[in-house]
Image (cartoon, rainbow, N blue to C red):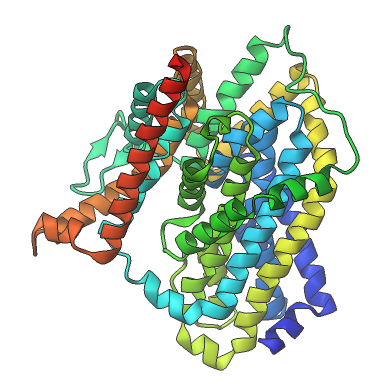
Amino acid sequence: MLEGLQLATGPSSLFVIAVGVLLGIMVGALPGFTATMGTALLLPFTFSMEPGQGLAMLGALYVAAMYADAVPACLVNTPGTPSAMATAFDGFPLTQQGHAQKALVASSFSSMVGATLGGLTFLFLSGVLASVALQFGPPEFFWIGIFALTIIGSIAGDSMLKGLAGGALGMLIGTIGISATGAVSRYTFDLPDLRGGLNEVAALIGVFAMPQVLRMVANRREKHTVASYTRSPGVSLETVREILRRPVNLFRSAIIGTLVGLLPGAGSPVASLVSYNEAVRWSKDKTKFGKGSLDGVVASEAANNGAAGGAMVPLAGLGIPGSAPAAVILGALLLHGLQPGPQLFQTRPELVYGFAWAIVIAGIGTFLFGSVLAGLLARMVTIPVRLLAPIVLFLSVVGSFAIRNNIIDVFLMVGLGVGVYLLGKLGFHPGPIGLGVILGPIVEPALVQSMAMTEASSAFEVFFTRPVSLIVIVLTLISVAWVIWSKQRERQHVVD
């Protein structure tokens, strides 16, 4: 570990980490440009580097891009990736209240804590936790998806029925393409480009960005800018102090993110949604969420960056990437002639531990750069709508197209955006729709695989007797009961 620390803190390593952080912030701040895309584009440039430095740069870009997704989510309600969707729930209302810089500083600080905890978990517990992650099979992933869906109760808005309908609609949208079983084409309208399914990033840009552009245009006469902003000194320190006054939410979110990140296939989107749900459930004032709660931003950002470090555990310990960017980093290891797995800890332990230290250092660098740039980035909201709306629309189109170089994704993004905008006029919140789009492709394959397992035993044995499944089922029931009780208590307060 000391050799790894020495490797990560060398002048050349610190330089490449700083470059990776800056590149990650640039990539993540653009809607649709994901951490996966950034690491894939940077991968060829690491061939000429030492393996430790190449991994450090890729890890730094990964961590910084996970934070930078919060920039468009907070400023223009445009989560460029699924993991930033929960950040937009409270980040954008904070911006509308004139606290854009506060939202960005909270995102960067929470990201630092999450990345640090995830990196330290990777550093000290890789071997043990990698074997635990293997205990999760299709039934466990199915119940985790159902548990994450309980967040609908927190973001449904004024009508729970409309929230549930929006979640169902989102999951229905997620079924576009070839089915998980039977190779049946669903809602493809005989278009070959739709058989591969709907791209999640393009769909989320459509659900959140396009309606926001349309609202900006519709209200341009009443609101000439997205929000007001006045730079005031001391915002960064004040924000950090406010977050540290409630340390339980911060560290609970980072721990949840790290644990979810250990599970191959779950990743940051599930981590941020589960963490946000727990922040709402344990809050003394649930009504503040969705209206500009700093705790909501903290919960989402600490979790999705904790998941970034957690995803490295099964990668290094088992050779199984826990997320899409981790798969790119796996490719980098293989291209450098390194085989991830237990033997890597025996042959090149300094590389593994150096990579873990690099993630921790990158988290600190993300906060330093993010807090310094927060004031500059926050000024974007003062750009006149007549200029900002076309810019957001242009970036949305480019981001949707760049994922798969497919114009169909752009058409779907626009179509979803117009549809969600019209549904918003009827009182539907975009959050549940986006939630369904994210969780549908996770829940359905897990359910299908679990049903296949019932052919060798009973459905009761597969779904209700496995220890991890039972724990998640209990948490799901508690979460649902908590939401029902909270709603009833709110109605009683209104009546009183």
- Left or right: residue 325 compared with residue 241: left
Residue in the picture at 26% in, 65% down? 467
**Which residue appears farthest toward the bottom when viewing the image?**
346
Say which of 491 and 380 sits in front: 491
Q: How many tags in the picture?
A: 0
Q: Position of residue 326 (x, y in %)?
A: 53, 65
Q: Looking at the picture, does residue 92 appear above or below residue 135? A: above
Q: Is residue 35 visible?
A: no
Q: Looking at the picture, does residue 149 appear above or below residue 423? A: below
**Which residue appears farthest toward the top when viewing the image?**
221
Q: Position of residue 140 (x, y in %)?
A: 30, 59
The image quarter containing residue 440 is top left
Say which of 267 and 347 sits in front: 267
- Left or right: residue 417 compared with residue 245: left
The image quarter containing residue 227 is top right
The image quarter containing residue 2 is bottom right
Q: Position of residue 266 (x, y in %)?
A: 42, 56
The N terminus sits in image quarter = bottom right
Residue in the picture at 76% in, 67% down? 17
Q: Position of residue 282 (x, y in %)?
A: 49, 45
- Left or right: residue 206 compared with residue 18: left
Q: Looking at the picture, does residue 97 appear above or below residue 368? A: above
Residue in the picture at 65% in, 28% down? 93
Q: Looking at the picture, does residue 234 appear above or below residue 93? A: below
Q: Is residue 272 visible?
A: yes
Residue in the picture at 68% in, 79% down? 52
**Which residue appears farthest toward the right when viewing the image?**
233
